[in-house]
Amino acid sequence: MIQCKDCELFERNAAGVVVFHCDPFMNVKEPECLAKWQLMKLNQMIAGYQAMLAYYRKLAPMQEKMFKVLEREMDDISEADKWRVDGDDDDEDDDAGGDDEWTDAPSFR
């Protein structure tokens, strides 16, 4: 098995970062290259996921505060509109009670 450092598709730049020019669809030297390539891509995905989680951890306290403010605003809106709902129920009771008041009135026939 050829080592990656001995392969012509391997490069280490001036900063010491390893760069692979191998493409699993075009120029694979050995079957083990595919496994290494998959491992590198998996590590990249994990690093991206961990960066995303770190970002979400920073946002979590702000989101909690925002949800609490929105919840208070919704409660205030519900409290402000409560008179509409309560007022409609009272009107229905008044209409039913209003008919009883006029039954004692004299009729003009």
Image (spheres, helix red, strand yellow):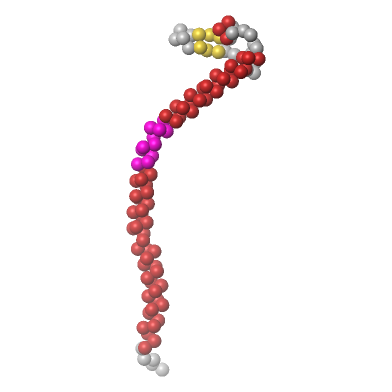
Q: In which quarter of the image is residue 65?
A: top left
Q: Where is residue 2 in the image (x, y as percent from the top left)?
A: 62, 7
* Res 105 quadrant in image: bottom left
Q: Which of 3 and 27 lies nearest the eye of the viewer?
A: 3
Region in magenta: 55-65
Q: In which quarter of the image is the C terminus?
A: bottom left
In the image, 27 versus 65, the foreground residue is: 65
Q: In this view, does 28 lie to the left or right of 104?
A: right
**Where in the figure is residue 20, as x and y percent of width and height?**
55, 13
Q: From the image, which quarter does the N terminus lie in?
A: top right
Q: Is residue 68 depicted above or below 51 in this figure? A: below
Q: Is residue 73 above or below residue 62?
A: below
Depth check: 82 or 46 in front? 46
Q: Quadrant of residue 100 in the image?
A: bottom left
Residue drawn at point x = 40 percent, y = 76 percent: 95
Q: Is residue 63 magenta?
A: yes
Residue 8 painted magenta: no
Task: Give the residue at x 42% y 29%.
Answer: 54
- Furthest residue in direction front, as rendered: 1
Q: Position of residue 88 (x, y in %)?
A: 39, 68
**What predominant SS class does the magenta segment belong to?**
helix
Q: Residue at x 36, y 37 (%)?
A: 61
- 43 or 22, which is in the foreground? 43
